[in-house]
Amino acid sequence: MSSFITAYIVGDSFEPITHLFNAITASQLERMLSSRNEGRADAERRKYVLGQGVGATRYCSLWKQLAEYGELEEIVLDPPVAPEKASRFHTHKHNDHNILIGQPEQIEPKHYRARLLIDDRCDDMADHVTGFHISGMCVLEAARQMVLAVAEGFIIEEARRGTLRFSTESVSATYDGFILPLPATLILAEQRLRKGPGGDFVLTAAIDFIQNNKRLARVETTVSAISRQFVELRERRLVSSLLGSAQQADLSSLEIDDAGHRHELMERTQ
């Protein structure tokens, strides 16, 4: 029996990179399976490893197509089922395709790991896709979700989950190379955790993006988690303050571009 030919499955947005190495888009694989079923293609045994850009629903659809065509022994998907994504609750997202990471696991004290699982329908890929690498904004959003998921899953006491609001105090990113649409891992290292009364806390963490055993990006961030009621009260007071200042202004001077509008409001509230 012949050995498997290994290739990567990537989202359709990454079609340009399929010309550089052994990769195939989800749409190309669907067409190939249809051709094999109709007897128009070669019958080489193939193993397809999940890369970036393929959502869980589509990945499951590919497996069902394999089963329907009786190809499960000739074509293998790795992993055989779609990896579990972090939940909407843990990432503070409403749409599954905007969740960019798998469910984090603790690998040692103060260290957590998750898979990078980008769906090319996500908002962060909607308007910046080279077809070759993961954008810097996707990296930042994945890091943000990693912090939230670790905090909600491991740091916040169960009774207080869902009652805190998160605020980013600082964030910086270092890119050591391009992250390709291939398997990748996030490692979060808790650098400092300061807890306050009532379960509030400030977390400083570093999130490394690992691909092919190399660190290709690091995001360092500090976030604070504060009582939802307290934050909502501050937001209401801020809105009242801003509206009060705007009403005193000459409205004609505010009918300018958005950046100018914000600048005027900032000056009047200092």
Image (tube, rainbow, N blue to C red):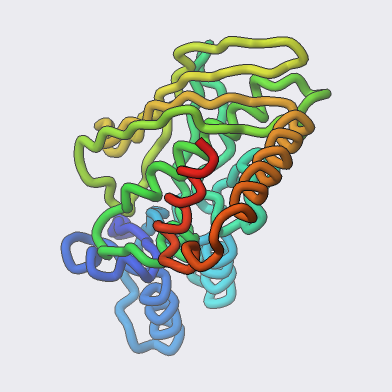
Q: Quadrant of residue 52?
A: bottom left
Split into 4 quadrants, where in the image is the N terminus?
A: bottom left
The one of 166 and 76 positioned closer to us in this rendering? 166
**Which residue shows up at 40% across the image and 57% down it?**
259
Name the residue at 32% across, 83% down: 41
- Residue 201: x and y, percent? 63, 17
The spot of residue 47 in percent (x, y) is 37, 58
Front-most of residues 142 and 25? 142
Give the tally of numbered discs. 0
Q: Could you tell whether 107 is left or right of 232 in the image?
A: left
79 or 107, which lies in front?
107
Q: Is residue 87 visible in this depiction of the protein?
A: no
Q: Above or below — where is 196 with respect to 180?
A: above
Residue at the extreme right of the image, as rendered: 159
Q: Is residue 186 left or right of residue 201?
A: left
254 and 257: which is toward the camera? 254
Residue at the left extreme, as displayed: 20
Query: Compared with residue 107, is residue 259 higher up or lower down, i.e. above or below?
Result: below
Residue pictured at 46% horizontal, 51% vertical: 264
Q: Is residue 159 above or below residue 132?
A: above
* Residue under the point 39% across and 87% down: 39
Could one spot residue 252 in this view of the protein?
A: yes
- Percent x, y for residue 138? 40, 49
Residue 173: where, in percent of width, then height?
31, 34
